[in-house]
Image (tube, grey):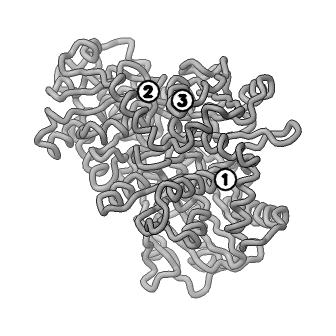
Amino acid sequence: MSRCPGVSGPPGGGSLRDDEPAAATSAEDLNANVKTSTRCWTTGEPLLDLRVHRWLSWDKVGHTHTHTHTRVCVCGYILGLYVYLSKCFPDLCTRGVVIGFDTRGQKASGCTSERQDVPVLLFSTYVPTPFVAYWVKRFGAAAGVMITASHNPKEDNGYKVYWCTGAQISSPHDKEVLRCIEENEEPWSDACWDAGLADSSPLRTDPLVEVTCSYMEELKSLCFHRDVNSSSPVKFVHSAFHGVGHRYVKRAFQVFGFPPPVPVPEQKDPDPDFSSLRCPNPEEGLSVLELSLRLAERVGARVVLATDPDADRLAVAEQLPGSDWKVFSGNEMAPLLGWWMLFNWRERNPPPADTKRLYMLATCVSSSILRTMAQQEGFNFEETLPGFKWIGKRMVELSTAGYRVLFAFEESIGFLCGDMVPDKDGVSSAVVVAEMTAYLQTQNLSLTQQLHRIYQRYGFHVSRTSYVVCDHPPTVQKIFGRIRRFEDGSYPNSCAGHQVVRIRDFTLGYDSSQPDHSCMLPVTKSSQMVSFNLANGILATLRTSGTEPKIKCYTELCAAPGESEVSRLEAELEDVTRTLVAELLEPEKNNLIGRLV
């Protein structure tokens, strides 16, 4: 690689020094960073260690000392959230707050708001994360809180905050909530330690039955072929990954006219230890789907559906002719679901219905296949920053302006079909995939065959996701500082023999293609993210994860329609990906452990 001539260095001459520590807490990505771990007593972050010490001096429940980090981050943040909500909503005492939890749960967190005379709609048992977002929007609550660490290791816990729109909290509210957290650390009174208040308070109501019935009723709007579903010979296996999903996926199948999916018995029931899994993340593919695939082969099921522990993401696998299985990436399921939603919209809205009122959304590290489809089919497409909070925020804006978001996704197997919930939803996505599969069966097509047909029409979009593990913030800063000053104080000019034609640095707000070199998307100072467009059509993005100690590398090569040498495209992309990771991240030198997906 060499220096990029004609492309100025980082704004301000590279204001992020190699030796600067990473931000301990992000005001711009509250939900991504609100997670806790009980794996160590020293966090390495002086501010958090100070808060732990303070909290121990206040905590009057002895056994909770073993969960100090969780209580500081979750209970403490609830205090700050209440303070901010009381400033924003004069009618907070009538709107209330929705609180849900997954199998890791921390049900008692709900009583914090009850002590301040705020009604709490606290689910009596674990629920999928999208249920909280759905009910905040549907009920008109001031906010929602979901206690979850999603697919993170069993030691972790944390929470997501939803604004009154049902979308995840974003700027400016996230910054103000964090400020209120810092200003309101001390518990209000000794009554704060009455954990039984979550069950006994008259301000607490349980919305479980009402939410489930309402959600399932609205889910019918995504069912287009119930007669096909009820007579389909296709069998499905479902794994809940020891999480909350199975009872709700089963109910959704009933709504669509399907018999229940076959559950993976070892993973059907909630288990916060995730006993049968080395990693409760269905995105890991074959290595974590082994029990599901074995069961599918025994019962003759052609398709496996796996929801993550809080049921907001979905992995899909299909048996190929013979005995092999194909596990679809998020970037492969997206064109299938995008095609399906547009196909059925057109069935219900024949010409002269106008596609100009329709949108599909994706994050900027996801496949650009929806953009290509939009150019041919006439609907609108927009990209957002990584994370469904940005998709949800844009959905709300578009809906307010009279547009409809038909489909949205992120490459990490997060999908949203329709506009029921302004967040990713593994429950609805699972049953929509089932219906799509059943319909394609009537056309003598598999999911894999239909994906191939889509690529033939719009061009193959081949993508790869790699990552390296790095839990040392100074090393991360050093790596990205080197990228910004690769040679002579500027970004790289080439990669694997291909010229870099565009650079976007989302951390510093830099875009080499714009006249004023300013990014069109919001700046993300809380995380590192730089993307490179290469002359051969490859887009590569390096980004730090908001929830895990990883640096991710996303690459995609888009071919013109008619290109049939897929193996050549895949080989070229893999070569560039490996070279980019080796040259820019220097895994061996920086002691990084890597994985190529």
Observer-nearest of 160 and 545 = 160
Query: For the residue carrying disc 2, how many other residues have a C-alpha within 10 Å: few (<14), some (14-19), or many (20+)?
Result: many
Residue 465 at x, y = what percent?
67, 54
Residue 242 at x, y = what percent?
58, 23
Mark sitting earlier along the chain (3/2): 2
Q: Are marks 3 and 1 in contact (CB under 8 Å)?
A: no
Disc assigned to residue 332 = 1
Residue picked out by circle 2: 127
Q: Secondary structure at mark 3?
A: helix
**Is residue 2 placed above or below 30 in the rendered structure?**
below
Q: Mark 3: which amino acid?
A: Val
Q: Secondary structure at mark 2?
A: loop
Residue extending farthest to the right is: 322
Q: Residue at x 46, y 59 (%)?
A: 349
Mark sitting earlier along the chain (3/1): 3
Q: Residue at x 74, y 30 (%)?
A: 301
Q: Is residue 256 visible?
A: yes
Q: On the picture, is 271 further left or further right than 79?
A: right
Q: Is residue 39 visible?
A: no
Q: Residue at x 71, y 53 (%)?
A: 450
Query: For the residue carrying disc 1, how many other residues have a C-alpha within 10 Å: few (<14), some (14-19), or many (20+)?
Result: many
Q: On the picture, is 422 further left or further right than 334?
A: left
Q: Mark 2: which amino acid?
A: Val
Residue picked out by circle 3: 249
Residue 124, located in which quarter of the rendered image? top left
Discs 3/1, front: 3
Q: Are marks 2 and 1 in contact (CB under 8 Å)?
A: no
Observer-nearest of 259 and 474 = 259
Observer-nearest of 153 and 146 = 146
